[in-house]
Image: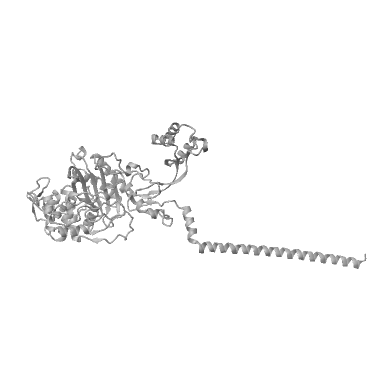
């Protein structure tokens, strides 16, 4: 081959290589472009899907995510965020007799042996009931609210028929405290009694249960109130007790108690209903709220209300004016008497200090039935008490014509029956400048208190603050006069009513108070149901000896918690009442 031929061949080979290289480059570029187009297409599809989810289906997506993250039921807290009721992950003990298939035997061991081993895990187990359930061969819960370590011990028994399914339970960290405020959640998941029932829909709604629901109560104050009420109830062998601490300017309930209490973590059938064998006519289920649902004749605690109405309506213009008190007040053929001789003539301060039925009745007679009814309606005595709870007692004796005789009896707290909550709201109106507001268990933010309605003039309220303070200094409220807290209030001891009339041996003892009387902020009421005369009460059954000391112990405990510190250099001026209170009779 010559040189020219070799050169041509080399050139031809190079050209073929260049052509092949060009083809490879074009192919590679095409593939890259195809991949880029494919990725772009996928990105567009993804963006379209995101847009569809975010725009076309936002509500369902958010709801499903929220439901997945939130507990099955919302949380309830006190006013400071302390948890009162919350969802609690737990196990249950379920008996499944079919777990071993068609062997015919639901258990490997005997029912008695299994019951014995379960009792070692749960010392409070009702062994007779569990043994009966195991022998019956019927499936069902043997126990709710089982802790993880207990579930492990159940599995260690080695019985396939004992299953421990995971559940979300309702847990009350404070135990029985504020049980009547909170209520409980039944096995079907619905709220019962208390605020669990009131807030049921909200607590189950995914859109609402993300944030805890704060109540008005302060658990520190609640604990102190329950503790002192329990001491008073046990010391006097009373059937029950009830009490409240109420903010007079907002209507917020800082504490509300009814005893005996129940444990919302483990509500028994006996807590909800009384056994048919129970023949005690005064017995009540433990879930019954004595403060909001039971009506009583509240006796002499009504006398300051009568005086306030008289001052406000203009029938009492001179506190030094006297009424004859040395003979019964006749209402038809019925004589109204005092428990003991007080004096021949009594003025307003003396009437309240010594709690005269006779002169209180005469003041009410001058007010008249029509005017008395008007004020009672402004105070809400004609309707069920105002509060969120569903258990609210209907007043008795308010209907019908308000005759002179009806006004007289009502003037010293007889003839009509209301709940202690009615009384608390009326005292709040009497001491706060004259404005009635509904009681509430919901926390009210600063500046959001309801306007309320005017019942008494501000001047009437100022005068009543003096008179109530005077009773605690000179009268039946002395046992509540906690030093430095400027307490004022009135006792009331009324006979309970039965089928045949008043029950002479059954009293309801009440002390209705407020503090500090130079600038009232809180109403405190303590009530004991059928207290007995014991050594602790100097063998007396009346409120001055049992309910009043309860308030006297509660106020020093809760005052500092509520921002009221003792100050013995301050007080409401009662210098103009002292001569009237100590004057001749």
Residue 450: x, y in percent?
29, 60
In the displayed structure image, the side of residue 26 where residue 289 appears, left or right:
left
Asked whether the viewer can see residue 515, the reply is: no
Above/below status of 335 relative to 15: above
Task: Note whether residue 197 is visible.
Answer: yes
- Tell me which corner region of the image, top left, top right, bottom left or bottom right, holds residue 250: bottom left
Quadrant (top left, top right, bottom left, bottom right) of the N terminus: bottom right
Q: Residue at x 82, y 65 (%)?
A: 16
- In the image, 176 versus 468, the foreground residue is 176
Quarter-of-image position of residue 375: bottom left
Question: Residue at horizontal 48%, vertical 56%?
Answer: 64
Q: Position of residue 541 (x, y in %)?
A: 19, 42
Question: Left or right: where does residue 576 sit relative to residue 112?
Answer: left
Place of residue 109 in the rendered image (x, y in percent of width and height, measured from the top left)? 48, 32
Instruction: Tell which of 369 and 275 is nearer to you.
Output: 275
Give residue 444's position: percent from left, percent from top.
Answer: 33, 57
Horizontal relation, residue 239 to residue 142: left or right: left
The picture quadrant where one finds residue 233 is: top left
């Amino acid at each position: 081959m010559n040189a020219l031929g070799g050169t041509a061949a080399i050139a031809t080979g190079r050209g073929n290589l260049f052509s092949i290289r060009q083809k490879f480059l074009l192919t590679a570029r095409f593939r890259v472009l195809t991949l880029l187009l494919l990725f772009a297409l996928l990105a567009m599809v993804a963006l379209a899907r995101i847009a569809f989810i975010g725009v076309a289906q936002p509500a369902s997506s958010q709801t499903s995510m929220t439901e997945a993250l939130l507990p099955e039921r919302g949380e309830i807290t006190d006013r400071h965020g302390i948890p009162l009721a919350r969802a609690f992950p737990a196990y249950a003990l379920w008996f499944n007799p079919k777990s071993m298939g068609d062997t015919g035997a639901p258990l490997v061991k005997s029912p008695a042996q299994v019951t014995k081993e379960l009792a070692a895990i749960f010392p409070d187990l009702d062994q007779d009931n569990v043994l009966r359930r195991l022998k019956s061969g019927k499936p069902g819960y043997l126990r709710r609210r089982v802790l993880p370590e207990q579930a492990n011990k159940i599995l260690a028994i080695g019985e396939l028929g004992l299953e421990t399914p995971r559940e979300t339970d309702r847990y009350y960290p404070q135990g029985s405290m504020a049980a009547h405020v909170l209520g409980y959640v039944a096995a079907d998941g619905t709220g019962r009694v208390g605020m669990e029932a009131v807030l049921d829909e909200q607590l189950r709604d995914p859109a609402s249960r993300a944030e805890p629901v704060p109540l008005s109560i302060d658990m520190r104050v609640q604990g102190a109130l329950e503790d002192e009420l329990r001491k008073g109830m046990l010391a006097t062998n009373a059937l029950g007790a009830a009490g409240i601490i109420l903010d007079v300017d907002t209507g917020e309930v800082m504490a509300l108690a009814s005893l005996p209490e129940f444990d919302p973590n483990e509500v028994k059938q006996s807590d909800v209903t009384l056994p048919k064998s129970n023949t005690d006519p005064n017995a009540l289920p433990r879930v019954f709220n004595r403060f909001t649902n039971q009506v009583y004749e509240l006796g002499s605690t009504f006398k300051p209300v009568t005086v306030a109405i008289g001052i406000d309506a203009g029938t009492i213009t001179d506190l030094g004016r006297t009424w004859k008190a040395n003979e019964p007040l006749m209402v038809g053929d019925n004589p109204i008497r005092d428990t003991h001789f007080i004096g021949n003539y009594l003025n307003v301060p003396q009437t309240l200090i010594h709690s005269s039925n006779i002169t209180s009745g005469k003041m009410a007679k001058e007010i008249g039935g029509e005017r008395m009814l008007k004020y009672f309606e402004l105070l809400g005595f004609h309707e069920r008490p105002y509060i969120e709870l569903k258990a609210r007692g209907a007043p008795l004796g308010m209907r019908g014509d308000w005759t002179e005789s009806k006004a007289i009896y009502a003037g010293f707290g007889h003839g009509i029956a209301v709940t202690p909550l009615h009384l608390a709201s009326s005292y709040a109106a009497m001491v706060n400048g004259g404005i009635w507001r509904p009681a509430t268990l919901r926390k009210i933010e600063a500046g959001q208190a309801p306007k309320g309605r005017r019942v008494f003039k501000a001047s009437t309220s100022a005068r009543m603050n003096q008179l109530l303070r005077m009773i605690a200094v000179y009268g039946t409220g002395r046992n509540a006069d906690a030093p430095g807290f400027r307490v004022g209030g009135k006792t009331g001891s009324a006979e309970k009513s039965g089928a045949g009339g008043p029950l002479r041996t059954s009293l309801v003892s009440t002390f209705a108070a407020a503090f500090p009387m130079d600038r009232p902020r809180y109403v405190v009421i303590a009530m004991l149901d059928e207290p007995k005369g014991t050594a602790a009460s100097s063998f007396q059954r009346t409120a001055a000896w049992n309910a009043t000391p309860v308030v006297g112990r509660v106020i020093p405990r809760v005052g500092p918690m509520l921002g009221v510190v003792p100050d013995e250099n301050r007080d409401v001026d009662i210098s103009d009442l002292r001569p009237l209170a100590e004057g001749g009779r």
